[in-house]
Image (spheres, rainbow, N blue to C red):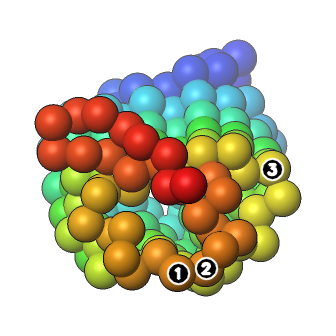
Amino acid sequence: MANCKTWGIKEFNEWIRRGWIRRGCNLNNTVTVLDLYNCGLTSLPESIGNLRAVTWLCVTCNKLTSLPESIGNLADLRYLYVYNNQLTSLPESIGCLNSLEELRVYGNQLASLPESITNLKYIKKVHVDFYLKDIITNVDMLKFVLFKEEKGDTKPAM
């Protein structure tokens, strides 16, 4: 398992069960891809923030109602896919993901996006539901937001 670069639900659950995802564990630096697509998850542990080498995190099509604040500790994260869950908000710590290039959050129950998203230096795309178009008034944010229509089309905000 020490040479593992990609994890699915089986590996993730095993590490949680054994308590291996913790601060200072050298093995936390081996995982770069964490794919937890459609696994029936209702929550993520705070310890997920200790997986510092993760560059791609997909928790799409689960039943998540929130994301842990520790998600902001994933300094190398470039792609975060959390669409089609039951999220009502995103943590402000999202703004600490300095390497983040793409964020997909459509298909949730979001009322807004955290202002901290405008702190992301390398963000290129944020995919959100079309109903958020009237809520997003920050001009800087509109530069990289793509609105998802109900039919599946994605259109730029500007």
Q: Position of residue 14 (x, y in %)?
A: 40, 38
Residue identifier under label 1: 137
- Residue depicted at x 81% and y 50%: 122
Label 2 residue SS: loop
Please tell me whether residue 39 is drawn above or below residue 74 in the rendered image: above
Of marks 2 and 3, the one in the foreground: 2
Q: CA distance from mark 1 to mark 2?
A: 4 Å
Q: Position of residue 98 (x, y in %)?
A: 80, 58
> Mark 3 packing: few (<14 Cα in 10 Å), some, or many (20+)?
few
- Residue depicted at x 71% and y 70%: 140
Label 3 residue SS: loop
Residue identifier under label 3: 122
Q: Which label was assigned to residue 71?
A: none
Residue placed most toward the observer, 91 or 52: 91
Q: Amino acid at mark 3?
A: Tyr
Label 1 residue SS: loop
- Which quadrant is the N terminus positioned in? top right
- Residue depicted at x 70% and y 17%: 3
Q: Position of residue 144 (x, y in %)?
A: 63, 53
User: Are discs 1 and 2 less than 8 Å apart at CB?
Assistant: yes
Please tell me whether residue 123 is drawn above or below residue 95 in the rendered image: above
Q: Amino acid at mark 1?
A: Thr
> Mark 2 packing: few (<14 Cα in 10 Å), some, or many (20+)?
few
Mark 2 vs 3, N-terminal side: 3
Residue identifier under label 2: 138
Q: How many marks?
A: 3
